[in-house]
Amino acid sequence: MGIDDTEFPSHLTLASPLDLNRVMDQARLDQGFMHRVITVLEECGVDDRTDEENALLEWARSFQRRQPGDAED
């Protein structure tokens, strides 16, 4: 069962390191979720993202680039 647009917040709220770890764990397992994390964070805009969100976005982009066959060229 995936997460659709109605279940995914328009702005990630990471209240604790545990929340960040849960998002990262889910993103590793589900490419659709990974794509949605990236999309939501990019839509926030650089000025509206927290330091944690910026770090998560960079991690997600890096992780996605390392996945074989998932490049969006």
Image (cartoon, rainbow, N blue to C red):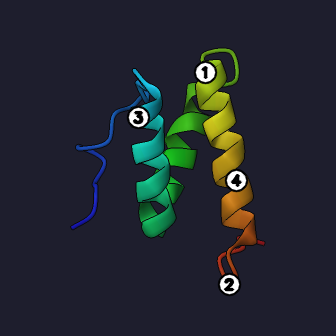
The numbered mark, 1 or 4, whose residue comes first in the sequence reads 1
**Comparing marks 4 and 3, which lies closer to the viewer?**
3
> From mark 3 to mark 1, how far is it between C-alphas?
19 Å
Q: Which residue is mark 4?
A: 61
Q: Residue at x 43, y 30 (%)?
A: 12
> From mark 2 to mark 4, how far is it between C-alphas?
14 Å
Check if mark 4's residue and mark 3's residue have beta carbons within 8 Å.
Answer: no
Q: Which residue is mark 3?
A: 18
Which secondary structure, mark 1?
loop
Q: In this picture, is 27 found above or below 73?
A: above
Which residue type does callout 2 highlight?
Gly
Check if mark 1's residue and mark 4's residue have beta carbons within 8 Å.
Answer: no
The numbered mark, 3 or 1, whose residue comes first in the sequence reads 3
Q: In this picture, is 48 found above or below 25?
A: above
Which secondary structure, mark 2?
loop
Q: Residue at x 40, y 24 (%)?
A: 13
Image x and y of residue 53, in percent: 59, 29
Q: Which residue is mark 2?
A: 69
**Quadrant location of the C terminus in the rendered image:** bottom right
The picture quadrant where one finds residue 29 is bottom left
Q: Residue at x 72, y 43 (%)?
A: 58
The numbered mark, 2 or 3, whose residue comes first in the sequence reads 3
Image x and y of residue 16, in percent: 42, 24
> From mark 2 to mark 3, how far is it between C-alphas?
30 Å
